[in-house]
Image (cartoon, rainbow, N blue to C red):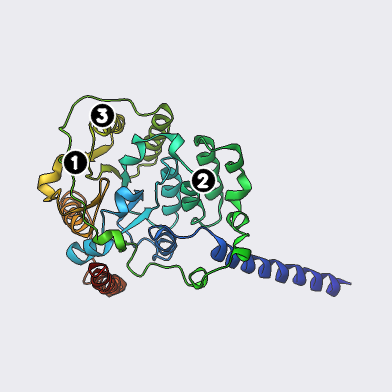
Amino acid sequence: MRSTRVKRLLRVIIFLIIFAVMFYNVHGVLGIRSTNGSVERINTFYEQPENSLDVVFVGASGLYRYWSTVNAWHDNGITSYLWSTPAQPATAAKYIMIDVLKTQSPKLFVIDARLFRGSLREISEGHIRHVTDNMPYSQNRIDAIDAMLDNSKLSESANRWEYYYFGFSLYHSRWEEGLSPRDFTEKQSKTQGTLVDRHTFRVTKLEALSEPTDATAPVEPGMKEILDDLCSFCKDNNIPVLFITTPFNVTLEHRMKLNDVERIVTESGLKYIDFNDYFDEIGLDYTTDFYNDGHTNYSGMYKFTKYFSGYLTDNYTLSDYRSDPEYAYWDDAYIEYRRTFVELREFYETQ
C-alpha cells in the first residue's frame, strides 16, 4: 500500500516537472517578440554571474540608445548592464531594482529621468509586457504587473491580469499564424546588452536645443506619486542611485517638466544630472550624432559613453576588472560587438 502511494507521488512529481519544462519552453517561444533587442538584453542580464555588475541602468531608450556597456568595459573596465526596455513604464523601476538586487549588489543604479516627463495614458500593453514577460516568475513579477496595471490608463480589454501573469496566453494564435526560426533560437545578447541595429548608423541633422530655463511645469500627478515612491524606496533601503536625463532635442516644455523631476529628486536628497546642460562638454554634434530627435546614433553613443564613463570613474568607487581573468567574457562581448558593428555598418552604408 505504502509503495503504491510512493509511486503515485513520484508520478505526480514527474508530471509537474514535465509540465514546468513545457510551460517554460512554450513561454519562451510564444512570449513577446523582441523590440530593440529587449528580450535578448534582459535574458542575458539574468545570466550574469552573481555580484559581478558595478552599475545597473534602469529605464527606456533614453539609456540603451546612449550607453554602450562594452565600450565602458573596454575603455574603463566598468562592469555595467542595461535593464532597459522600449518605453519602459516609470512604475516598473522599483520592481526592476528589486529583481536586480536578488543577484547583484551594484555600487550604483542609474535611473532614466525621462520616464517621468510623460503621461500614464501613453503606457501601452506592449510597454508593460516588455518588462514583465522578460522577468522570471516570482512574487515581485506579480507585484510589478499589478502596480503597472493599477497605474496605467489601459482599456478594460487590455487590462486583463491573465494576459500578463501567463504571457503566452495572448500569443497562442501564433501557432496558427506561423512561427519563424527566430522564435526557436536562443534569445541571448552576445554584446552584453549593447544595441547595434539599423538606427545605429542613421544620421539626422537636428535643430539647436532650446535655451535652458529655470521655469518648471509640474509632472503629471500620477507620475509624481510614482517618483516620490521610488525616491523613498531608494532612501529607505540605502540604495545608491543617480537619476539622469540623456541629451536629446529637448523642447522648452520638456525642460520645464524635467526641472520638476529634478526638484522632486533633489528634495528627496538624491542626485540628478541633466546632460542636456553638458552637450558641448560631451562633444555632441547636432549634425552627426543623432538618428532622430530623441536618440543618439553610434557616434553619439560612443561620445556619451566615454564622457559618462569618465564621470562615473571620477565620482564613484568602481573597480577596473580588465586584468581579472574571471571577467574575460567581457572581452569576448567587446570583440563580438566590434565584429557585428563592422558587418552591419558595411551593410547599411550600401543601402
Q: Amino acid at mark 3?
A: Met
Q: Secondary structure at mark 1?
A: helix
Residue 267 occupies quadrant: top left
- The residue sitting at 75% across, 67% down in the picture is 12
Dot 3 corresponds to which residue?
256
Question: Which mark is on residue 48?
Answer: none
Q: Quadrant of residue 29?
A: bottom right
Q: Is residue 113 above or below residue 140?
A: above
Q: Residue at x 24, y 58 (%)?
A: 202
**Left or right: where 129 falls relative to 325:** right
Above or below, comparing residue 39 to residue 139 in the picture: below
For the residue pair 220 and 33, the one nearer the viewer reads as 33
Q: Earlier in the sequence, mark 3 or mark 2?
A: 2
Amino acid type assigned to the residue bearing label 2 in the image: Glu
**Helix, strand or loop status at disc 3:** helix
Q: Is residue 348 visible?
A: yes
Residue 167: where, in percent of width, then height? 58, 55
- Mark 1 or mark 2, whichever is nearer to me: 2
The residue labelled by disc 1 is: 276
Mark sitting earlier along the chain (3/1): 3
Single out the residue that lies furthest toward the right: 1
Q: From mark 3 to mark 2, how far is it between C-alphas?
A: 28 Å
Q: Is 238 placed left or right of 201 in the picture? A: right
Type of amino acid under label 1: Asn
Q: Position of residue 261 (x, y in %)?
A: 30, 32
Any part of residue 108 in sight: no
Whichever of callouts 1 and 2 sits on the residue coming sooner in the sequence is 2
Residue drawn 59% across the image and 62% down it: 174
Residue 334 at x, y percent in the picture: 26, 70
Q: CA distance from mark 3 to mark 1?
A: 13 Å
Q: Which residue is mark 2?
A: 125
Q: Distance from label 1 to label 2 (Cα)?
A: 30 Å
